[in-house]
Image: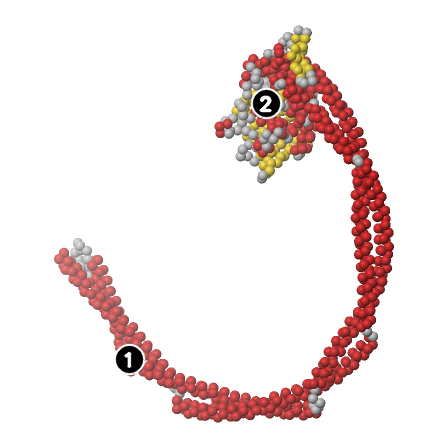
C-alpha cells in the first residue's frame, strides 16, 4: 500500500505532502491544478519514468518547477509488513540534467542509482513499468473508454493491455524475415552457373602448377644468389685491404711532397756564407751598441729630470710674482675701504661709541626713575577718595577744594612725567640705532686692519723673484739645446742598433733553417723507405675494384631476377587465392541456400506456433478476466436484471456482453450510461487483479468524462463502498466535484492561481 508522497518543485508543485489510506483515495480539483502531476510523480518514483516522459511529450528538465535547480519525489509504501521509502531527485547540471535515486527499507539504505532502484522496485512489486501502465495506471481515459472504441481499435487496445500485441508484432516481423530469407535463397540459387564452376576449377589447377614452377625457379636463384653473396663478401674484404693500403700510400706521398717543398723553400732562404762565428760577432757588436744606447738614455733621463725640476721652480716663481701683484692690489683696496670708513679715526670712533653707551645707560636709568614716580603718584591717587578728611601723606585736614587741587596737581605731574618718559624713549631708540651703526663700522675697520696686517706679513721681494726667474729661464734653454743634441746622437745610434739587430735575427734564422733542412732531409729519406716497404701498386687496386664491381653486378642481376619472379609468384598466388575464394563462395552459397531453405521452413513453423500461442493465451486471459469480472459484477452492480457479464473474442474485435433473460446480449445495445460505467469499471478492476494479482492497486484518471450526473453519482457510490471490497488501494483523479463523497479513504482538493503561475495547493477534505 502507498502511504504517502512528498513532491518538491515538481511541475506546478512547490512542496506538496499527501497521505494515502487503504481504500479509494480521491484527488479533485480544477483542470491544470496539478492532480495528474501527482500520478506522474508516483510512476517516476517507482520506475524513474512516466508515460508523457516516455513518449517524449515533455523533457526531463520540464518537470523542474520554473526558476528552481532541482525537483524531488519521496514516495513511501508498506509491503509485507515492511516500510519502504523511495527518493528520486532531478538536478540541473550546467547544460545537462541528471538524476539521483535511493531506496530505504525500515529506514536503512539498501540501493542507490536510478537503474538499480528501478530494478529493485520491479522485483519487490513483481511488476515492471510496462505492466504498471497497462494494468494499473492509464493517463486521463474516461471510464467507458473501451466501450466507445470501434471494433478494430478495441481489439488493438485490448491486445495491448493484455500484452498480446507483442505476439502480433512478432508474427509480423517473422513474416518479413521469411520473405527476406526466401528472396536471399532464390538469389543464391540463381548465382550458381555450372560452366563457370568448371572454368574456375580448370583455372585454379593451372595457377597451382604455375605457382609450383615459380617457387622452384626462385629456390634455384636464391641458392645462386647466396653463392654470389659469399663471393661478394670475400671480394669486399680484399678490396677494403687494398683500399686501406692505397689510402696509406697516398698519405705518405702527400707528406713526402710537403717535406720536399719545405726543403726546396729552405734552400732558397739559406746563405752558405753565414756561420756561427759571424752570428756571434754581430751579436757582440749589438750588445755593445745596446750598452751605449742605455747610457745615453740614462743621461737623457737625468737631464729631463733636472729640466723638469727647473720648470716646476720657474712655474712656482711665476705664481709667487702673480700672487704678490694680487696681494698689493688687495692692500690698495683695503686702504681705500679704510679711508671710506674713517679708519684713521678708529680711537675717536671708539670714544664716541663709549659716550653713546653711557648715554644709553643714563636714559634707561631715567626711564626707570620716571616709571617709579608715576607708579607712586598713581598709588597716591588711588588712596585719595571722596569723603576723606585727612591727607594720606601729611595727615592735614582736607576739604573738597583742597582735595580737588591735590588731584589736579598729581594728574599734571603724571602727564608731565609720561611726556618726559616718551621723549626719553624716543631718544633711547635713536641712540641705540647709532650705537649699532657705529659698532658695525668699528668691526669692519678692525677686520680691514687685520687683513692688511696679514697681507703685509705675506709680502715677497719681487726684484729677487724676477732675478731668479731669469736665471731659470736661461738654464732651461741650455738644457733644451743639450737635449736636442743628445737626441740626434741617440737617434743615429738607435738606427744602427735596429739595423744590426735585423742582421742578427737574419743570421739566427739562417742557422735555424740549416738545422731544419737537415731534419727535413732525414724525414724525406724515412718517408721514401716507408713507401718502398709498403708494396702498393695501382694495378692491384684497379684489379680488386673491377672484381668487386663484377661480383656486385652479378648479385644485383640475380636479385632483380628473383624479385621479378617473387612479384610474379605474388600475382599468381593472389589469382589462385581469388579463384579459391570464388570456389569457396560458390560452395558457401550452395550451403547458405540449403540453410535458408531449412530456416524458412522452421520460421513458418514458428509463425504458426506464435499464432497458436497467441490464441491460447488470449483464451486463457479472457477466461480469467471473465471469471474476475463476474465476481466483481455482483459487488459493483446492485440489480438482478443482468446476472452476468463477459468479454467475447471474435476475429476482428472484443465484445462486451451481459446475461439477461437466459441469453447473452451486447452491452452497448441494452445498457444505460450508469450501467456502462459500472461495466467499464468492472473491466478495469478485473484487468488489474488478473495482470497484477500481487499489488491490488488501481489508478483512474478523469473517469467521469462523457458520464451524465446519474452515472457520476453511481460511480461515486461504487468507488466509495464497493471497489475497496475488491481492490486494496485505488486512486481517482477528477475535476468533477459530483464524484466527491464523505466515505472516501482520503480526499484532497487541489487549486492554484494560474494567472500568476502560483504553486499547487493541496487541502485535505
Question: In the image shown, does 243 or 86 lie closer to the viewer?
Answer: 243
Q: Is residue 393 left or right of residue 194?
A: left
Q: Position of residue 382 (x, y in %)?
A: 21, 58
Question: In the image shown, does 137 or 562 lie closer to the viewer?
Answer: 562
Quarter of the image where one finds residue 454: bottom left
Question: In the image shown, does 239 or 183 lie closer to the viewer?
Answer: 183
Q: Is residue 760 left or right of residue 116?
A: left
Q: Residues within 10 Å of mark 2 (few under 14, many from 20)?
A: some
> Which residue appears at 67% of the width and 92% of the height?
281
> Which residue appears at 53% of the width and 34% of the height?
67
User: Where does the C terminus fall, quadrant-wise?
Assistant: top right
Tell me the SS state at disc 1. Answer: helix
The residue at which mark 1 appears reads as 340
Q: Position of residue 620 (x, y in %)?
A: 73, 18
In the depicted structure, whether residue 405 falls above or below residue 45? below
User: Where does the N terminus fall, quadrant-wise?
Assistant: top right
In the depicted structure, whether residue 519 falls above or below residue 45? below
- Rounded to the nearest angstrom, the CA distance separating label 1 from label 2 is 134 Å
Q: Residues within 10 Å of mark 1 (few under 14, many from 20)?
A: few
Tell me the SS state at disc 2. Answer: loop
The residue at which mark 2 appears reads as 140
Task: Report whether residue 111 is seen.
Answer: no
Question: Of label 1 and label 2, which has the lower sequence position?
Answer: 2
Task: Report whether residue 415 is seen.
Answer: yes
Q: Position of residue 709 (x, y in %)?
A: 55, 14
Res. 471 mark: none
- Numbered disc in front, either 1 or 2: 2
Quarter of the image where one finds residue 555: bottom right
> Which residue appears at 86% of the width and 56% of the height?
223
Amino acid at each position: 500500500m502507498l502511504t504517502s508522497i512528498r513532491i518538491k518543485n515538481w511541475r506546478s508543485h512547490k512542496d506538496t505532502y499527501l497521505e494515502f489510506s487503504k481504500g479509494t483515495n480521491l484527488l479533485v480539483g480544477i483542470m491544470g491544478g496539478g492532480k495528474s502531476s501527482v500520478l506522474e510523480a508516483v510512476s517516476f518514483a517507482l520506475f524513474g519514468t512516466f508515460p508523457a516522459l516516455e513518449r517524449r511529450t515533455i523533457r526531463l528538465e520540464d518537470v523542474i518547477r520554473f526558476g528552481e535547480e532541482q525537483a524531488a519525489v519521496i514516495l513511501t509504501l508498506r509491503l509485507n509488513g515492511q516500510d519502504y521509502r523511495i527518493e528520486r531527485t532531478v538536478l540541473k547540471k550546467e547544460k545537462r540534467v541528471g538524476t539521483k535515486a535511493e531506496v530505504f527499507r525500515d529506514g536503512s539504505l539498501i540501493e542507490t542509482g536510478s537503474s538499480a532502484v528501478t530494478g529493485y522496485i520491479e522485483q519487490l512489486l513483481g511488476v515492471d513499468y510496462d505492466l504498471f501502465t497497462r494494468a494499473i495506471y492509464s493517463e486521463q481515459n474516461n471510464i467507458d473508454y473501451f466501450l466507445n472504441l470501434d471494433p478494430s481499435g478495441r481489439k488493438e487496445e485490448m491486445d495491448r493491455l493484455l500484452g498480446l500485441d507483442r505476439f502480433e508484432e512478432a508474427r509480423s516481423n517473422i513474416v518479413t524475415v521469411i520473405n527476406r530469407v526466401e528472396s536471399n535463397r532464390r538469389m543464391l540459387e540463381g548465382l550458381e552457373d555450372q560452366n563457370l564452376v568448371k572454368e574456375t576449377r580448370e583455372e585454379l589447377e593451372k595457377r597451382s602448377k604455375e605457382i609450383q614452377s615459380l617457387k622452384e625457379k626462385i629456390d634455384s636463384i636464391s641458392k645462386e644468389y647466396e653463392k654470389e653473396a659469399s663471393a661478394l663478401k670475400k671480394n669486399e674484404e680484399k678490396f677494403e685491404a687494398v683500399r686501406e693500403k692505397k689510402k696509406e700510400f697516398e698519405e705518405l706521398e702527400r707528406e713526402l711532397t710537403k717535406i720536399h717543398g719545405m726543403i726546396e723553400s729552405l734552400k732558397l732562404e739559406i746563405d752558405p756564407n753565414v756561420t756561427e762565428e759571424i752570428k756571434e760577432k754581430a751579436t757582440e757588436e749589438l750588445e755593445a751598441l745596446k750598452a751605449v744606447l742605455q747610457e745615453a738614455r740614462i743621461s737623457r733621463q737625468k737631464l729631463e729630470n733636472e729640466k723638469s725640476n727647473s720648470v716646476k721652480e720657474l712655474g712656482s716663481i711665476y705664481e709667487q710674482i702673480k700672487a704678490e701683484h694680487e696681494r698689493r692690489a688687495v692692500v690698495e683696496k683695503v686702504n681705500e675701504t679704510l679711508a671710506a670708513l674713517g679708519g684713521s679715526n678708529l680711537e675717536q670712533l671708539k670714544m664716541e661709541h663709549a659716550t653713546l653707551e653711557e648715554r644709553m645707560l643714563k636714559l634707561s636709568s631715567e626711564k626707570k626713575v620716571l616709571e617709579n614716580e608715576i607708579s607712586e603718584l598713581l598709588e597716591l591717587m588711588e588712596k585719595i577718595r571722596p569723603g576723606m578728611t585727612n591727607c594720606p601723606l601729611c595727615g592735614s585736614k582736607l576739604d573738597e577744594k583742597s582735595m580737588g587741587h591735590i588731584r589736579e596737581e598729581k594728574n599734571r605731574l603724571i602727564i608731565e612725567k609720561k611726556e618726559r618718559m616718551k621723549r626719553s624713549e624716543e631718544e633711547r631708540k635713536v641712540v641705540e640705532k647709532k650705537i649699532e651703526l657705529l659698532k658695525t663700522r668699528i668691526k669692519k675697520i678692525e677686520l680691514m686692519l687685520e687683513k692688511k696686517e696679514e697681507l703685509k706679513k705675506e709680502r715677497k721681494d719681487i726684484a729677487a723673484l724676477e732675478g731668479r726667474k731669469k736665471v731659470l729661464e736661461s738654464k732651461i734653454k741650455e738644457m733644451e739645446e743639450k737635449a736636442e743634441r743628445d737626441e740626434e746622437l741617440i737617434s743615429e745610434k738607435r738606427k744602427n742598433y735596429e739595423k744590426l739587430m735585423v742582421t742578427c735575427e737574419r743570421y739566427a734564422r739562417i742557422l735555424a733553417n740549416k738545422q731544419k733542412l737537415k731534419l727535413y732531409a732525414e724525414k724525406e729519406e724515412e718517408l721514401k723507405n716507408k713507401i718502398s716497404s709498403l708494396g702498393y701498386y695501382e694495378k692491384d687496386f684497379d684489379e680488386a675494384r673491377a672484381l668487386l664491381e663484377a661480383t656486385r653486378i652479378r648479385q644485383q642481376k640475380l636479385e632483380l631476377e628473383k624479385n621479378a619472379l617473387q612479384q610474379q609468384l605474388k600475382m599468381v598466388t593472389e589469382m589462385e587465392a581469388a579463384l579459391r575464394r570464388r570456389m569457396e563462395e560458390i560452395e558457401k552459397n550452395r550451403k547458405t541456400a540449403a540453410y535458408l531453405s531449412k530456416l524458412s521452413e522452421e520460421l513458418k513453423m514458428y509463425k504458426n506456433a506464435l499464432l497458436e500461442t497467441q490464441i491460447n493465451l488470449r483464451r486463457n486471459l479472457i477466461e480469467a478476466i471473465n471469471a474476475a469480472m463476474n465476481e466483481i459484477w455482483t459487488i459493483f452492480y446492485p440489480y438482478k436484471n443482468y446476472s452476468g457479464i463477459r468479454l467475447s473474442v471474435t476475429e476482428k474485435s472484443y465484445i462486451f456482453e451481459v446475461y439477461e433473460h437466459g441469453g447473452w446480449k451486447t452491452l452497448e445495445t441494452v445498457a444505460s450510461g450508469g450501467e456502462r460505467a459500472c461495466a467499464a469499471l468492472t473491466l478495469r478492476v478485473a484487468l488489474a487483479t488478473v495482470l497484477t494479482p500481487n499489488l491490488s492497486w488501481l489508478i483512474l484518471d478523469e473517469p467521469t468524462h462523457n458520464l451524465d450526473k446519474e452515472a457520476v453519482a453511481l460511480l461515486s457510490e461504487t468507488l466509495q463502498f464497493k471497489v475497496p471490497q475488491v481492490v486494496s488501494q485505488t486512486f481517482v483523479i477528477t475535476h468533477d466535484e459530483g464524484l466527491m463523497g464523505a466515505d472516501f479513504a482520503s480526499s484532497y482538493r487541489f487549486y492554484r492561481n494560474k494567472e500568476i503561475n502560483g504553486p499547487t495547493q493541496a487541502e485535505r477534505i
